[in-house]
Image: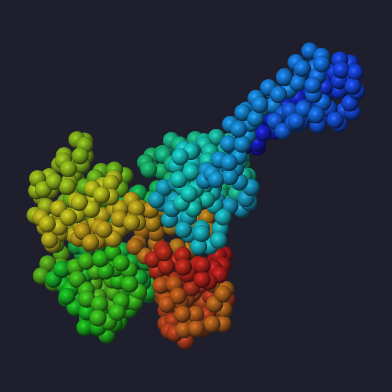
Amino acid sequence: MSEWRRRTGYSIAVLVILMIAYAIAYYYGMSVFEGEPKTFLHSLQVVIEAFTTTGFGSDSPWTSPAMNVLVIAMDLTGVALIFLALPVVVFPLIEESFSTSAPSSVTLTDHIVICAYTPRGEMFIEELTSRGIPYFVLVADRDRADDLHEDGVMVVHGDPESPDALARVNLADARALVADASDEENASIVLAAAESDTRVLTFVENTGAADYHRYAGADDVFSPRRLVGESLANKVTTAVSTELGDAIEIDPTFEIVELPVQSGSDLAGTTIADSAITERTGANVIGAWLRGEFVSPPAPDTRLDEHSLLLVAGRESQLERLKEMTMLETRPRRRGRVIVAGLGEVGSTVAKTVETDGLETVTVDIEDRSDVDVVGDVTEESTLREAGIEEASAVILALPDDTQTVFATLVIRELSPDVEVLARSKETASVRKLYRAGADYVLALAIVSGRMLASTILDEEVMGFDKQIEVVKTRCSGLDGRTLREADIRARTGCTVVAVERDGTTVTDVGPDFEVRASDKLIVVGTDVAMNHFAASFELASPP
């Protein structure tokens, strides 16, 4: 019960008691002091007229002092009650009627409880919304909760570390709880949820805190920062090598890979039609990232440059031939130093992975630490020159702030137009800015985190979290008996079906006339937004 309803209930109870008491006194006084007996109902009517200031003194004048004092007391009590009712009952009622305040409790079942609202949580919410799965975000700060409520986010005001607040979001009947605050707060949230059997998932900024979350009772602990760091490091090592490297294996003979087009390569400056990629290599171009925008399929007149990233599928030998076409012919193995800027969880993981692969690494950070080679601001030219930007083959930006990352990219690109720039962004909105600033590859932490959650809670079979596109293997009962041309998946959703797993065999020759069966698992490729459209357009059945 809200505070306003509680106060209203008390006020009504006091009012009724006062009215009955005054009615009894008036009934008694008129008989004893005035000698004019009245009924109790008439006495109650006089009291109500006095309290509401609508009385006309039907029994006046009163001759006895006692009755005059009683009537004066009734009049004053009525006026006092009116002034008290305004701030206690009336004003709160009006405020609540027009209020946009977030609720403090819900009565849903089979929902997802998300503790705190972050960019990765926002990505996960998009996944839930596309699938019609109910959720609520539990936010401790009242103003923050009200703002999110006004923005249309399903939010509840309450302290996620309080068992009472978790009870008010009906945690016992929820599908899962996601703790997405700081490492310390997440551990406290897990302990607060200990009385419930609901599945609990947490994120850790520092991988060293993962064990403590498990000790507290977390069922799943995610460390997306380490995965992002490893992915960026792999991009560097494969960029300076003629080997294919970081690919998503659909089956032992069929893979999907992202290939950046390097400046001065065979493909740079050509259109999709003129490049004749399929004719020359046998690989199929599924889509392309063009300055931060994913296009699937790219138009024949789409021009490729050093900021283009091809998403291609094919056999290993075909993809290796295509990679040779994307690399700089004069320096296919540029193995200069790798500059790692920002030594948080992501940057430290990158540095360790790159050093393990035998590449020279120079670390840059604003703080003076034992593992920092150059202390300084990576957005300043002097810092980059001290780190050896002229001799570097790649720069990996693992900075904590996206605005700083964008500016650093501009400075780096001005100093060294040919260096590979790989960046980590916190929010998806920064990805396009970074590509426009000149980054060669960008991976958003929010996207990786959202995929981890969706894969775990929604039982999606995600094939590779650490890519700019999402590859999902899933059943789609809504397509049973329909051909891919009839479904028109690419036009309706922006996704592409690249293969189908049928009776234990992967079919990669899936043309427009391929007919889908209910038992098939479709391997679908697209951006996270496109995959949400796919989920909303077709009924997805979770794989067993």
Residue at 75% over, 24% down: 18
Is residue 447 something one can see in this rendering?
A: yes
Location of residue 540 (image quadrant):
bottom right
Q: Viewed as shown, does residue 8 lie left or right of 230?
A: right
Picture residue at 89% right of the left edge, 16% below the top: 32
- Which of the 4 image quarters holds residue 348? top left
Furthest residue in direction bottom, as rendered: 513
Q: Is residue 493 left or right of residue 274?
A: right
* Quarter of the figure with the C terminus: bottom right
Depth check: 132 or 193 in front?
132
**Residue at image location 12% in from the left, 67% down from the top:** 331
> Residue 509, percent across and down?
42, 82
Provide residue 171's location: percent of width, then percent of height: 60, 44
Is 427 situated above or below 514?
above
| Left-right relation of 256 to 354 | right
Quadrant containing the N terminus is: top right
Which residue is at 35% across, 74% downward?
A: 296
Residue 193 lies, in percent from the top left, at 57, 39
Height in image: 445 above or below 368?
A: below
Q: Which of 99 and 403 is in front in this view?
A: 99
Report whether residue 220 is seen: no
- Residue situated furthest top in the rendering: 65
Residue 182 is drawn in which quadrant?
top left
